[in-house]
Amino acid sequence: MDATREAIRPTTATRGSILLVDDEEKILRALARALRDEGHDVVSVASARAARQHLAERSFDVFVVDNVMPEASGLELIRELVLSTPEGDRPQILMMTAHATVESAIEAMKLGAADYLQKPFEIDELLVHVRHAIEQQRIRPGYRYLISERDEEFNHYGVVARSKVMIEVLRRVERVAETKSTVLITGETGTGKELVARAIHDRSAQRTMPLIKVNCAAIPETLLESELFGHVRGAFTGATANKKGKFALADGGSIFLDEIGTMSQGLQAKLLRVLQEREFEPLGAERTEKVDVRVIAATNRDLRQMVADDRFQEDLFYRLNVIPIEIPPLRARPEDIPLLVEHFVQKHRQRIGKRIERVDPDALAALTGYGWPGNVRELENTLERAVVLSSGSSIAVADIIGLAPARAEHSALPSLRLHQNIEWVERETIRRALDASRGIKKDAAELMGISQRALSYYLAKYKID
Ligand SMILES: Nc1ncnc2c1ncn2[C@@H]1O[C@H](COP(=O)(O)OP(=O)(O)OP(=O)(O)O)[C@@H](O)[C@H]1O
Ligand SMILES: [Mg+2]
């Protein structure tokens, strides 16, 4: 990347949502791609009619519109927008115009457009203009980081995603859903492995059949075998009746083997057999049972390394790893954070019944700047707390608390704002948590997701009674 590109690469605070309208498809595509590469959320349409629809449905930070189009001119669209929408709710407007129509650009600016671009222009010129426009939008009085209906657009079977890497994951989900192949999902804790497993099942032809989950780590080894394959009466002490195993229950559907990396060597061999022969014997049974099940396994461990260390059977690894899906950690895809924030705020405000309408820009900056060692789960917990703690109609930076101290390798982006305000934030947070829990320390600590000892430390540090 050359120096000028680097210099204008926006920070998360200057990424925004853009509606781009141009009837020349080729130009439209090139501009949209360049804007997306900068991390913006771009809706591109080729007609005035489609533009009207989008403007009516949701809000944008910037509206970039070509002037000369068949159905209606850019100037007409701008006029409509200005007349129909109060300034506080309007996007910044940029008009693209050819030399011959510069007069309408001036007209547009009189109406309130931020600027215009004279065609032909360099793509970098557009990027700089858009960036300025977003900055203007962010500092506008009353700017709201809107909690919008965008969820639908970026929500694929419950998986909210926008980053390139996650869109790639979703493509793979779609492709594998059509098959019955075994899938191995890997990723750090809290990245969404179970969610992706469900998405695969829910998209598959077997979606009306069961998806059975087995957490291999949660069940003692001795019980796991009977849990998976079932047992007959008298197979062991306490086996007072026949019991169906999870494989039998999942017949015709899918079985989700979570934390497969914790499975004992003995069970690994038995699982291998099911994968190879599609058959097994319940504990203590003489008969063999056949099953038709798709296996989806997940782990946060490095199975390849475990194979190298002789802790995981190589054959089983290859049988499981037919279709690998690797979910990247959240810090590797910060573009997803604003969408996930909206998604979780919406989810929890509904649950709790609060009327939260926005996330303050400072708070969003703190969230996008953090390294998220606990990934999406940690983000969700943080936002759930924030929704509980927030006292107005917005989530403020002081509501964002309980973040685990970021380890150096985890922080993709510096969270300067957070550090600058950290003492204030801590004090304010504790004060509010104590308020919310009527001074009961145990509850306040729980609300903040810290230990009581940590709370005592903060109380002493800030001399709070
Ligand atoms: N892309 C996403 N969109 C919406 N919600 C998500 C996404 N990723 C994760 N979540 C949510 O985050 C939480 C954790 O996800 P999940 O349980 O699937 O993670 P996991 O990888 O299985 O974690 P673990 O390794 O700890 O079992 C869940 O509540 C899930 O719904
Ligand atoms: Mg899981």
Image (spheres, rainbow, N blue to C red):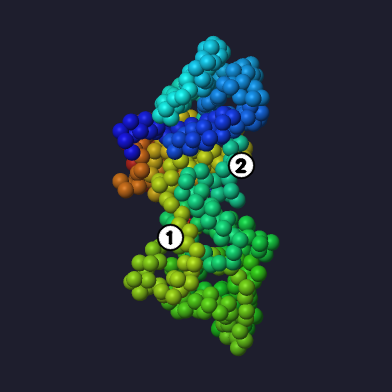
User: Is the residue at mark 1 in contact range of ligand 1, meaning its CB lies under 8 Å from it?
Assistant: yes
Mark carried by residue 152: 2
Residue 346 in the image, given as x and y percentages of width and height: 58, 39
Q: Which residue is drawn at 46% across and 41% down?
A: 335
Q: Which numbered marker is on residue 161?
A: none
Mark 2 is on which residue type? Glu
Q: Is residue 238 visible?
A: no
Check whether the beta carbons of the residues at disc 1 and disc 2 lie within 8 A of each other. Answer: no
Q: Is residue 38 above or below residue 71?
A: below
Q: Which residue sits at x=56%, y=14%?
A: 104
Is residue 201 shown above or below 89? below
Who is closer to the viewer here, 321 or 302?
A: 321
Location of residue 201 (image quadrant): bottom right
Q: Which of 278 and 52 is in front in this view?
A: 52
Residue 228: x %, y % from top left: 56, 74
Please tell me whether residue 364 is drawn above or below residue 187 in the rendered image: above
Q: In this view, does 94 lie above or below 12?
A: above
Name the residue furthest bottom. Answer: 286
Left or right side of 73 for 268: left
User: Mark 2 Cα within 10 Å, few/some/many (few <14, many 20+)?
Assistant: few
Residue 300: numbered disc? 1
Judging from the image, what secondary structure is the residue with disc 2 in? helix
Q: What residue type is labelled 1?
A: Asn
Residue 173 at x, y = what percent? Answer: 55, 56
Q: Kindly tell me whether mark 2's CB lies below 8 Å from ligand 1.
A: no
**SS class, disc 1:** loop
